[in-house]
Image (spheres, rainbow, N blue to C red):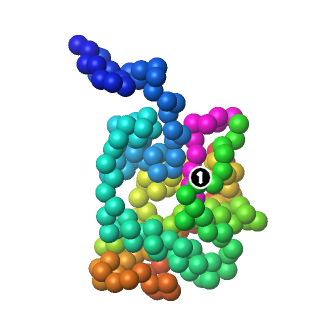
Amino acid sequence: MRYEFNDFWVENNQVYIKEHVKKAKPITGTKIGAITSNNPWSSPFVVFMDMYRFTIPFEMTIQVKKGMEYEPYVIEGVNKLSETEFQDYSTSPYYDWDVNSEQGSKYNGKIDGWDKERKIILECKVTSNKNLLKWTKNQPPKYYLLQMLLYAKLAEANEVWLSGYFLNPEDYELPTKKEINRSQLRIWKYKFDGE
């Protein structure tokens, strides 16, 4: 049975895109976890809908808002704590690099920080302190690691760092602090050999 829609049709449990639909947007680090079914907040179908510009409602939750507000301060904190020089890309509305020619335009990414001299990518995650024990006992969620691996490959980075900044419940209610609390910050470092 075939089901027709304006921009696509479904037949035999497969989705087919009509010719008039624009080319798909690139796969980004945020999407890679969902594509591999490793992100509990998204799915391959949601990524498909987004890549072909079909409307998906996005809710700006307090968690997302606070994460975006804190990221520049977390980058400053990581720089002070680790004596690195990450350039802050967290507030940039643009993707930070074009992919290597061998990968065409299928992949892209928006990093939070970049130490160009040492070729280290910094990815910042701001989350609830309820996740601190889970992240430190095991490791950060797999979908974040997949995101960082994609960025490392695209940037030909030697290393990727993931900073976790763990907010207390009251941090969601109060104005965003410009100085971060070092006790709420953790950094995981991963070497990358390009394979």
Could you tell me which residue is drawn at 69 percent across and 34 percent down? Answer: 102
Question: What percent of the width, then of the height, locates residue 101?
Answer: 71, 36
| Amino acid type, residue under disc 1 in the picture | Tyr
Question: What percent of the width, then of the height, locates residue 84?
Answer: 68, 75
10 Å crowding of disc 1: few (<14), some (14-19), many (20+): few
Numbered range of the magenta stretch? 102-111
Q: Nearer the viewer, residue 5 or 169?
A: 5
- Relative placement, left or right, of 192 versus 188 is right
- As drawn, which residue projects farthest toward the right? 117
Question: What percent of the width, then of the height, locates residue 152?
Answer: 62, 53
Whether residue 104 is in magenta: the answer is yes
- As drawn, which residue projects farthest toward the top? 1
User: Residue under circle 1?
Assistant: 95
Q: Is residue 137 visible?
A: no
Could you tell me which residue is drawn at 40 percent across and 45 percent down? Answer: 34
Q: Which element carries disc 1, helix, strand or loop?
A: loop
Image quadrant occupied by the C terminus: top right
